[in-house]
Image (spheres, grey):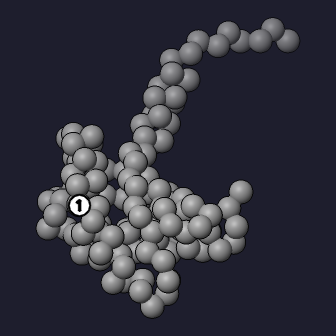
Amino acid sequence: MESKRQLQYSKLIQRELSEIFQRDSKHLFGNAFITVTRTEISPDLSVAKSYLSFMLVENKDQMLELVREKTKSIRQVLGNKIRNQARIIPSLVFFLDDSAEYAVKMNKIISNLTIPKADI
């Protein structure tokens, strides 16, 4: 379970990363719409795991690799944004968030089930 400090810090990181992907780094990723769905922070605040969702992208794995290649510049922009609010700028680790795809898959499976009517 995360502490209150970790939760506050992860929300700050998530908010600022979202802004970076939407406004500041638009030129790096073209017309891709990148959403930060969740951010988890380590207890010592040194590592932030961020889960990303991509829209308007054909190959999500390739876009995730591009984001990972640009991690250093993203961290630098993040540091400039939160330098007055945080002492530690965490290392960033990005993962693909596939929860939306999983939900669609489960809905499809459930809708295809044939459930017999109960005899009362």
Question: Horizontal and vertical percent for residue 9?
Answer: 55, 73
Question: Horizontal and vertical percent for residue 60?
Answer: 27, 42
Question: Horizontal and vertical percent for residue 93?
Answer: 40, 55
Does residue 19 show up?
no
Q: Which residue is mark 1?
A: 70
Which of the two residues, 95 or 26, is positioned nearer the viewer here? 95
Q: Residue at x 46, y 29 (%)?
A: 105
Q: Residue at x 19, y 68 (%)?
A: 26
Which of the two residues, 8 or 113, is positioned nearer the viewer here? 8
Q: Is 19 placed left or right of 65 in the picture?
A: right
Can you say whether 16 is above or below 42 in the image?
A: below
* Callout 1: SS: loop
Q: Residues within 10 Å of mark 1 (few under 14, many from 20)?
A: some
Which of the two residues, 55 or 45, is positioned nearer the viewer here? 45
Q: Residue at x 28, y 48 (%)?
A: 64
Q: Quadrant of the N terminus?
A: bottom right
Q: Quadrant of residue 6?
A: bottom right
The kind of residue on which mark 1 rests is Lys
